[in-house]
Amino acid sequence: MSVVYTNIRRPDRAVIDGLAGHGVATVHEAQGRIGLLAPTMRPIFAGARIGGAAVTVSLPPADNFMIHIAVEQCQKGDILVVAPTSYSDAGYFGELLACSLVARGVVGLVIDAGVRDVRDLTAMRFPVWSKVIYAQGTVKETLGSVNVPVICAGAAVEAGDAVIADDDGVCIVPRKRATEVLTACEARVSKEASVRERLSRGELGIDIYGMREKAKSRGLVYREQPPGG
Amino acid sequence: MSVVYTNIRRPDRAVIDGLAGHGVATVHEAQGRIGLLAPTMRPIFAGARIGGAAVTVSLPPADNFMIHIAVEQCQKGDILVVAPTSYSDAGYFGELLACSLVARGVVGLVIDAGVRDVRDLTAMRFPVWSKVIYAQGTVKETLGSVNVPVICAGAAVEAGDAVIADDDGVCIVPRKRATEVLTACEARVSKEASVRERLSRGELGIDIYGMREKAKSRGLVYREQPPGG
Amino acid sequence: MSVVYTNIRRPDRAVIDGLAGHGVATVHEAQGRIGLLAPTMRPIFAGARIGGAAVTVSLPPADNFMIHIAVEQCQKGDILVVAPTSYSDAGYFGELLACSLVARGVVGLVIDAGVRDVRDLTAMRFPVWSKVIYAQGTVKETLGSVNVPVICAGAAVEAGDAVIADDDGVCIVPRKRATEVLTACEARVSKEASVRERLSRGELGIDIYGMREKAKSRGLVYREQPPGG
Amino acid sequence: MSVVYTNIRRPDRAVIDGLAGHGVATVHEAQGRIGLLAPTMRPIFAGARIGGAAVTVSLPPADNFMIHIAVEQCQKGDILVVAPTSYSDAGYFGELLACSLVARGVVGLVIDAGVRDVRDLTAMRFPVWSKVIYAQGTVKETLGSVNVPVICAGAAVEAGDAVIADDDGVCIVPRKRATEVLTACEARVSKEASVRERLSRGELGIDIYGMREKAKSRGLVYREQPPGG
Amino acid sequence: MSVVYTNIRRPDRAVIDGLAGHGVATVHEAQGRIGLLAPTMRPIFAGARIGGAAVTVSLPPADNFMIHIAVEQCQKGDILVVAPTSYSDAGYFGELLACSLVARGVVGLVIDAGVRDVRDLTAMRFPVWSKVIYAQGTVKETLGSVNVPVICAGAAVEAGDAVIADDDGVCIVPRKRATEVLTACEARVSKEASVRERLSRGELGIDIYGMREKAKSRGLVYREQPPGG
Amino acid sequence: MSVVYTNIRRPDRAVIDGLAGHGVATVHEAQGRIGLLAPTMRPIFAGARIGGAAVTVSLPPADNFMIHIAVEQCQKGDILVVAPTSYSDAGYFGELLACSLVARGVVGLVIDAGVRDVRDLTAMRFPVWSKVIYAQGTVKETLGSVNVPVICAGAAVEAGDAVIADDDGVCIVPRKRATEVLTACEARVSKEASVRERLSRGELGIDIYGMREKAKSRGLVYREQPPGG
């Protein structure tokens, strides 16, 4: 059955912004090293770092009918998350759809497929994380669903989950865990600040983290490089 | 048999320039969603958008003898299109060959293999679309052919076809269809202008394109997100 | 057995700097078209060109214990070369480790796996050549070895080998051959200068390199493009 | 947190057997074209067709500690479903673990990673669907979880889901839907029987399925092949 | 435009059978090392060796409408050649369609996409060369064309070309060249028979082919393995 | 420089036979989990298990000149190990070369490239481990070297190393370590026999290997599956 769920619940905006400020690597660590999309998902230009609530789209290969349907469900601050039901590298999305999303305040697109018009999208600074850049067009024939749970690039995403994306990739935080993960991020960042300072002064991580003893107990030996060679 | 066809016919320069101005995605749509090279073909730097007449090269893996032979067949405004007879990631092409092509007015290279010296090529602003960047050298031992039909990254290319390349990839327009495709591009762009304006004002594509009725007739349903979750 | 070799021998710094100045493509040619890592190894930002002595790390998939151990073995001008014992795309390395390496004067990282915090690393201008960018974290549980011979992205690397890396990829020069390869680079560059000048003036490579006769003797024929088509 | 859930609920055995009898393609269609693992999952030998209840394992790359832990949770008729937290091609599983699973009545293994001893496993007729065959060993150092929800080769799997696997791949049926999907399979198979008979007698699918009119209305034209060529 | 060309010309059956008898490697060599599909095309079971006239299908990703349309164009001895317009791994074809093709005397399928029901197809001994085995279903919504020129797995195929397929892959022989290529195959096979006999008796290819002198003139040297190591 | 080293040293035949009897997975474990070729290397037919001394060939992409040269260096019981200097999927080797190797007593081929005539090779039971099966021919133009160190599918191989290959892949044992590794294999096999017996009786690996305590100390918890779901 093809269905569009409306009126989805979203995380608090301030929480999303907090998560986005920490970036993907920190959020991923803070929530227990889960939630990452596959590293095949790459930004079309460097330097963007965004957060938003997921509007999810499940659709067929090379058919973008449901992206057009999904636009209406988007609000300011959302991120569209698009997952084909089988492999597709078609260019589902280009500059016209971006104009439409921008008009609704959508902050970016995550798509496990192709995107096109990247020159225009870059000029608009509309960030997209995709598997591929490809001008190949799609049809508008077959239904799918909006705001159902999807698996996008190997990660489970539900409508209203927080999506964080930057140059390191894309990470999903379940809506109900968003506040708790933000707190964990803040704790992690505080701790890292002092480590960073010590490392920058030349202290070694193996001393700061107490790894020497662990290495020794597991049998690590040190030797002079033998002569010759 | 190894053969070099000389005196190939080329499309009108103004037509090529017109196509290049529209870019790959528009040209591809305007000619009926055909003619694209595979998305494995990526530019070595962002922002280039070129058009030219194809000088085609069929050659063996890791052997660039025929690129040297092909240079002589190139004219101002051409694009060299290089297709190995089986998979190769070798770096067939670098800065010296680029100097030679620039001297003849060639505007770019499309190669279903590797390229090297990309730092120099970027500094020269000589655009290359390739499958890979790799310093691995080639030999100059075995013949191939120039200006024969080739299949490059999954697309058929004949000598003198129009080649359009930008950040979205590479599209081939058969020489005899170039004028007709340009006309179709212009029609498409005119139509898109008004759609863009409406989308940017917040109108929805599903209304502009009349997709609501189609979605309904095919069974799409709208539901409130259920509580909980 | 897990072992760390200390006090490794390194090439002369001036020789490394000389090699780095020539870049990967020239060094690779000058030493006989060997020593390249696979083209899967890509820089996280464009434009870096570095040379250094290899500190090698052999370690398990998704476990960066040994990178922490290896930091202590690094000196000013070194490059860390990290090779997992089986495929891994995990993000072994990020900004904190970079701070630590920078404090020791390390000039870059080459890793046949993943890296993260690329936004920060780019801001620091700490260059990394990796297979993938991925935020996925690692554990610190299992030993490996430092300064043993490794195979990294298909190339054999020994501790103290010269590592040259730029936008074309990464090339290894065995420590004992470094001076000889530098001499060969210089000879090559001298020879190329006059060729470049002749090519830029419009002379053809097939004349400069004497390829016309070779092509003819192997059976290359020239023909006018037939009418029609 | 690392956790092992015990006493999981499983579908009715007769339902699983019914699903297995229909095979992957039919089950997948009957439940609405969802639930398939990626086509990278291939059987180590042809001809096996099994069904079982999923015992799920989430574990680190190249570390099979949790497979050993999971064995204890397995019952007669189960299938072990193993998903690393990031890419691994290591050989997590071989003949000794298969002996252990066989002793508990487990009917097969589905693993988004590597397997080894395939000669022995084939001789034992213990079926495995894996991404790769690789002798590379693993360590036993780092915890994961058993019977938590996992994403295996792109499909969501929960403990106690029905797993159906044959030469076409692997399909997951959520535990609560198993009976309903079996009913849908039976309906589908009945319908197909008469179609098969008509097709085998030479009737055309375009007539049986009423596709001629649809094709015509969408603009399909028939033409004689032009002369020449 | 979507078009079905009818009444295509086919090569002489005896010629096709002759080519098929020689197999893919010989046919490919005999016609000048061209015409191969990419090595991604693999048979679903070992040992089949077939030849037939191509009925070509160009169709969208994950939509098999046009395969149903194409069946009607097939005659005894044909091979269906299916090429999606962009990447698809969907399972376009299964046992029901095979029943339909068998009823018309079609000898096999070549598809640059996915196939399913391979257990049944193997039992029927209906050979298929495909990129992938995948149960993922398709829709029947969007038109394409039948008996137009296609590029299938990197090779150009026209309706009525001879298709030869065996365990080495798939090779296309243009219809008009089929007789000439058969003659070349026969010449090649005759010549190989005596070489085979001499090699089997222990003569060396470097002597039979006169390679010693060529090797020497290009600088090959022979040395005793140095002591040590 | 192109060189052929003659009169290479080989391991004792009985030692090679002993290693081959244990198979790849055991040999790999016994020598410390090193020496494996990448899992891309697959046998052309199932069930072969061979051992031999390596005759190594370094050669250019799509050029099999040096295989012909190498045949003369082969003795009874050898395995030819072929490594192109950059990626090639060309079919370097077919039935005629196999006849020649069989005449000299060579027991198999390991090639990080393509092979063809697999139907004939299978009929002859001449085993080959290759990256791909592909009919694409090669030229015989450019030299390489025989019995130099090569990197084949990611593993370092020297002339005279022991090569073990079976359905799990290919493993290299350095010549000087062959006897020691055989001893380690025997120890491992003895130990496994009793473990196998205990596992087959239903004992758990976590008890046999003492993993319960380790799991507990690292924080593993057991919980009842919660109701619902």
Image (cartoon, coloured by chain):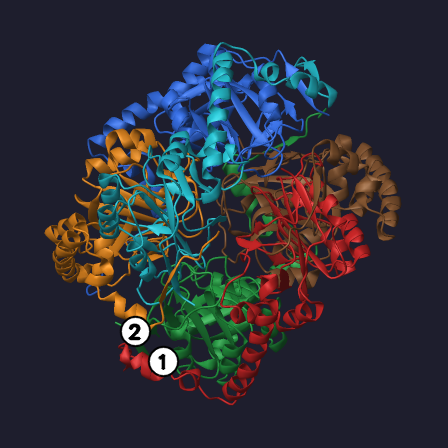
Chain colours: A brown, B green, C red, D blue, E orange, F cyan
Task: Give the x, y percent position of residue E158.
Answer: 27, 57
Q: Residues within 10 Å of mark 1 (few under 14, many from 20)?
A: some
Q: Mark 2 = which residue?
A: C229
Q: Secondary structure at mark 1?
A: loop
Q: Residue at x 10, y 51 (%)?
A: E14
* Residue C115 in the figure: left or right of residue B26: right
Residue E219: % across, % down: 36, 71
Q: Is residue C94 visible?
A: no
Under tag 2, what secondary structure?
Answer: loop
Q: Position of residue F207 (x, y in %)?
A: 61, 14
Determine whether label 1 and label 2 are within 8 Å by CB.
Answer: yes
Residue B139 falls in image quadrant:
bottom left
Q: Position of residue F166 (x, y in %)?
A: 38, 35
The residue type indicated by label 2 comes to: Gly
Is B179 situated above or below C53? below
Front in this rendered view, residue E27 or A121: E27
For this orientation, the residue located farthest to the front is E227
Residue placed most toward the observer, C63 or F155: F155
Q: Residue at x 35, y 29 (%)?
A: D46
Is residue D111 shown above or below B2?
above
Compared to residue F105, the image places residue B145 above or below, namely below
Residue E34, by quadrant, is bottom left
Identity, as a three-letter code, of the amino acid under mark 1: Arg
**Left or right: E32 with respect to A192?**
left
| Chain designation of label 1 | B
Q: Quadrant of the N terminus of chain E?
A: bottom left
**Which residue corresponds to mark 1?**
B9
